[in-house]
Image (tube, grey):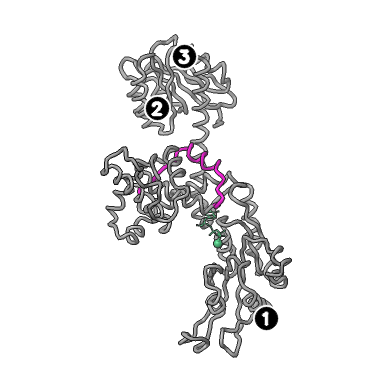
Amino acid sequence: MTRPSSPQVAGLPVQQEAAARLIVVDDEKDFALGLARLIRGRYPAMEVATAHSGKEALEILSCRGAQLVITDLRMPEMNGMQLIGEALKRVPDLSIVVLSAYGTIETAVEALHAGAYDFLTKPIEPDQLYRVVDKGLERCRLLEENSRLRQILASQVDGRRDLVGEGPAMQQLRRTIATIAQSDYNVLIRGESGTGKEVVAGLIHRSGARAAKPFISVDCPSIPENLLESELFGYVKGAFTGADRDHRGLFAAAQGGTLQLDEIGDINPVIQTKLLRCLQNGEVRPVGANQSFLVDVRIVASTNQDLEARIRDKTFREDLYYRLNVLSLTLPPLRERQEDIPLLALHFLKRTCRESGLEEKEMTPEVLRWLAARPWPGNVRELENFVRRLTVFCPGSLIDLDLARALLDGGQGSGPIALTSRELPAEAPSTSYKVAKEQVVDSFTRRYIDELLTVTRGNVSEAARVSGLSRVALQKILGRLGGTAASYR
Ligand SMILES: Nc1ncnc2c1ncn2[C@@H]1O[C@H](COP(=O)(O)OP(=O)(O)OP(=O)(O)O)[C@@H](O)[C@H]1O
Ligand SMILES: [Mg+2]
């Protein structure tokens, strides 16, 4: 918020290092001056201007800019409500505090709806004033941070292909990736589930000499054990029942490129041995074949397990471990790099809107701060899924804290789609049959849609296809659920 000082304008003291700018607007001159004096006394670095009409306030705003405005509501010519509208047109991020006399709280609430940030009741208590100004300053800081993040995001996502984050751990990680990409040794990536191991493996591939060749990622545990061997190394016709033609494996498919073996700790001893042989002599023998063929594949293995412990209990081959672990890097869990969370959240927000064909949405700074304070045991993947849900369920264009809190509470523990006792009407119903039934259907719909969106990664077109609903019908349901997200269950 620090910026160089500029020429003096009526009422604005010149300072070496100008901080936030605030305008006090009140047609009662003495009152405005008194308020400005109070504020200057408490915030010596702040540039405080006074204006005695809405028109004058707008002139100062256009000429000098401001982050904060404290304005009276009842003024001749342009009243406070009109000023709010005009001022926000000029500076959309402006934090406006309205002053209201006792007994006119309704007007203050109206002003909040019109875009004011907070209100103060006259007569002004200094402590109350400072609290509101502190809050306003904090909001300015968050908004500035927000726009800074957006700028970084624009450059990172275009230039660095989706590895988002700018904290110290991420910067160190980028340097390590660049170094690793220059060499051609095998790599072992460690990190908890969802920390971005696959993203990093892809980046190592794309940044190195093999970039023009294939990158193939295999999630080892997701392939049945009896099929993994033939998937990796291929098979020949007649190798086993059902092998009615030759099948080239993933090693062959990745020829010249990179093969990521995800959750390497889970592969069984037979495959470990075969993999070791392949790494030792660069040859692969398909299942049922008499001959081997040469492969040139860089292995990037990844794991969430303690491989050293697996070696000690003899479930993982030590010699294979050394072949894989020539170079290694560890991805920190998200809770240890909270500084990256706002940037990641904005990235996922933008991506979900694009993927789902939704208009661009925004998140309030409060939501970003709240997200950053959460532990995210499922790491970036969990954050990504949560932001997808927020985006899709948000009925308007602004995601606020109420929606975020409601979705988090509601999203927790939503198990398989089935009726549970929680949803069944109470034994002695206190509501009519119709209302009780609506509640059950509503609850079912929420969980169904929630899981549907998780499965389809928030893609509305895909969700429509899977659910058999038309896109319009699905959008309607989403709008309805989003609108009452506070009761989300
Ligand atoms: N730094 C990042 N920037 C942007 N997206 C990220 C980042 N890290 C992870 N993601 C996203 O988070 C999700 C999980 O990442 P990824 O699949 O790479 O994790 P993983 O560590 O391989 O997880 P697992 O152990 O479950 O295989 C992906 O959708 C990925 O795009
Ligand atoms: Mg993975």
Three-letter code for the amino acid on which mark 2 is drawn: Ala
In which quadrant is the N terminus drawn? top right
Image quadrant holding the C terminus, namely top left
The residue to which callout 1 is attached is 281
Residue carrying label 3: 124
Front position in the image: 294 or 65: 294
Residue at the far top: name it.
30
Asked whether residue 84 appears in the rendered view, the answer is yes
* Label 3 neighbour load within 10 Å: few <14, some 14-19, many 20+: few
Q: Secondary structure at mark 1?
A: helix
Image location of residue 482, percent across then percent down: 36, 44
Q: Which residues are magenta?
A: 358-379
Separation of marks 3 and 1 at Cα, in angstroms = 81 Å
Q: Residue furthest front?
A: 428
Q: Which residue is mark 2?
A: 116
Tell me the amino acid under the disc marked 1.
Answer: Asn
In depth, the one of 198 and 407 nearer the eye is 407
Q: Earlier in the sequence, mark 3 or mark 2?
A: 2
Question: Residue shown at 43%/56% (left/top)?
Answer: 416
Residue 267 drawn at (x, y percent): 61, 71
Whether residue 300 is visible to the viewer of this picture, yes or no, is no
- The kind of residue on which mark 3 rests is Ile
Q: Residue at 67% across / 81% down in the picture?
A: 281
Mark 1 touching mark 2, by CB under 8 A?
A: no
Q: Quadrant of ligand 1?
A: bottom right
Crowd class of label 2 (few under 14; some 14 to 19; many from 20; radius 10 Å) = many
Q: Is residue 435 left or right of residue 382?
A: left
Q: State left or right for residue 329 relative to residue 50.
A: right
